[in-house]
Amino acid sequence: MSSIKQLSIVLANQIAAGEVVERPASVVKELVENALDAGARQVTVDIEDGGIRLIQVSDDGIGMSSDDLPMALLPHATSKIAELSDLEAVATLGFRGEALASISSVARTTLTSKTDEGEMAWCLASGSAEPRPASRARGTTVEVRDLFYNTPARRKFLRTEKTEFGHIDEALRQQALSRPLIAFELKHNGKTQFSVRAADCEESRRRRLSQLCNEDFVDSALVIDEYGSGLSLRGWVAKPTFSRSRADLQYFFVNGRVVRDRLVSHAIRQAYRDVLFHGRHPAYVLYLELDPSAVDVNVHPTKHEVRFRETRMIHDFLFRSLHRALAETRAGLAADRDE
Ligand code: ADP
Ligand code: MG
């Protein structure tokens, strides 16, 4: 008999969960991404005790049928891609089919969902075999209770409620920034933390930005709106007078996805180089749109990293766009110096 054994599905999922589910905020991120992929117009997040006791995400998206519900909890089960070539131009935030399997292996998870076609809603708790009839409007609610209840070693790494909630708040603000046309609400222990409506004009986008970010940033921000070589860059960058001592107000979205990328931050830093004092950091909220096949998002399970095909071109485009926008302030600085 071989000493090598295949892991049970539950154990394999719990191990895989280590990559996706680090803390309550990572659960929120995954569930909200699913809501966005389902075409939600409104996403509501209810948290209890920093997400350690409860994370509940509700959406009004396309929903799941009673047949979908058990499938959704299986590892490597997804409706978003079917073959390798689909990965070339993936337009959804998810595609690995791992999140719900991972989450439900380390927390008590319940899915309730209704589609337009279905006559009623269905509800499935992880660990039970069959969905039960339920009642709700079109859309999905995922309830995640007692995170890491069965993996005490992981539970030990959770911080205080306040710290964990801080991470959730930040994660959801980022997601709300990434999708200006979608309404978001965050509640903690029954109290509304923030609530933003869809913003479809410049004026309402600015208002929404000041609800989600720092008001002073919005007041001092320069508008960016640049197109060229199949790339589009929109958003806001702070004038150098609004620099930060920490790199905390820096949001960069690539095709609606929050991204941290060295090439991007390098290009932006270069553009600010001669207008910012040493040790100060620029603030920005920028949206880069490009052909999905020009960027690889399949780099890491949390998908914060991306790989651009044409790194040089992206770098130059970002640098030139911001450098031009900052030219005015540069001229102002020069005038001050000449006086
Ligand atoms: P992925 O998002 O990578 O496909 P997940 O484990 O996050 O994997 O979700 C598995 C599947 O469950 C999704 O492909 C989708 O079909 C379905 N699903 C999950 N959440 C929702 C939701 N909020 N609304 C509709 N369908 C959902
Ligand atoms: Mg997903």
Image (cartoon, rainbow, N blue to C red):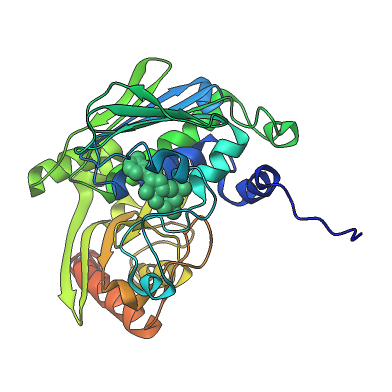
Residue in view at x 43 percent, y 43 percent:
29
Residue in view at x 30 percent, y 71 percent:
292
Q: Position of residue 221 (x, y in %)?
A: 22, 52
Res 336 seen here: yes
Q: Is residue 328 left or right of residue 103?
A: left
> What is the number of callouts on the image?
0
Res 173 seen here: no
Res. 156 image quadrant: top right
Residue closest to the eye, 99 or 227: 99
What is the residue that sits farthest to the top in this orientation? 190
Residue 252 in the image: above or below residue 153: below
Q: Is residue 32 left or right of residue 116?
A: right
- Screen quadrant of the N terminus: bottom right
Residue closest to the eye, 125 or 250: 125
Q: Position of residue 264 (x, y in %)?
A: 40, 69
Residue 339 in the image: above or below residue 109: below
Q: Is residue 300 left or right of residue 3?
A: left
Q: Is residue 118 left or right of residue 140?
A: left
Residue in view at x 47 percent, y 30 percent:
130
Residue closest to the eye, 327 or 141: 141
Residue in view at x 29 percent, y 57 percent:
256
- Screen quadrant of the C terminus: bottom left
Res. 174 image quadrant: top left
Q: Position of residue 188 (x, y in %)?
A: 41, 21
Q: Position of residue 314 (x, y in %)?
A: 33, 78
Res. 91 image quadrant: bottom left
